[in-house]
Image (cartoon, rainbow, N blue to C red):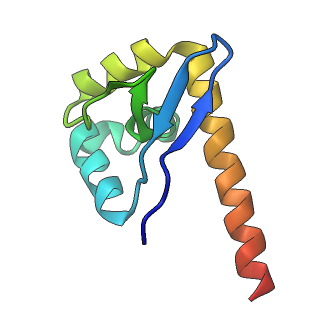
Amino acid sequence: MSESPREVTDGRGRRIRLRRVGALEKLRLLKAVGPVLAQNEAYLGVALLAYSAAAIDDVPLPVPTSEAQIEMIVDRLGEAGLAAVAAALKEEDEAETVALAKK
């Protein structure tokens, strides 16, 4: 199934393209943050937002494979980018919940 890229604009006017984060990607995220930080829900939540960002203004972001790469993406996104990604993911979750409820 082909989908158009998902994109959101943050409060600074930057276009942030999102990547799908499925089960395998979540497992890889846990590996990237390591066993200690994987237990820290607040850190893991922000790391998931960073992991979900694929590009900023058409400049690709690597899939993070380490704590340092996650922190680099968090730094690039900043508060405005993280908020935009969080809002987009929340909207998608709510739409999916509604769709499942209709089945």
What residue do we see at 23% from left, 21% from top?
Answer: 68
What residue do we see at 35% from left, 44% from top?
Answer: 38
Q: Does residue 22 sit above or below 56 in this rendering?
A: below
Q: Is residue 81 left or right of residue 20?
A: right
Q: In x, y percent, where is residue 58? A: 40, 25
Q: Quadrant of the C terminus?
A: bottom right
Q: In x, y percent, where is residue 72? A: 32, 17
Q: Does residue 46 sit above or below 79 in this rendering?
A: below
Q: Is residue 21 left or right of residue 15?
A: left
Seen from the viewer's position, the closer of residues 46 and 52 is 52
Instruction: Give the residue at the far bottom of this rendering.
Output: 103
Q: In x, y percent, where is residue 50? A: 42, 32
Seen from the viewer's position, the closer of residues 4 and 21 is 4
Quarter-wise, where is residue 71 in the image?
top left
Q: Is residue 92 left or right of residue 81?
A: right
Q: Quadrant of the N terminus?
A: bottom left
What residue do we see at 73% from left, 62% from top?
Answer: 95
Seen from the viewer's position, the closer of residues 60 and 76 is 60
Q: In x, y percent, where is residue 37? A: 34, 36
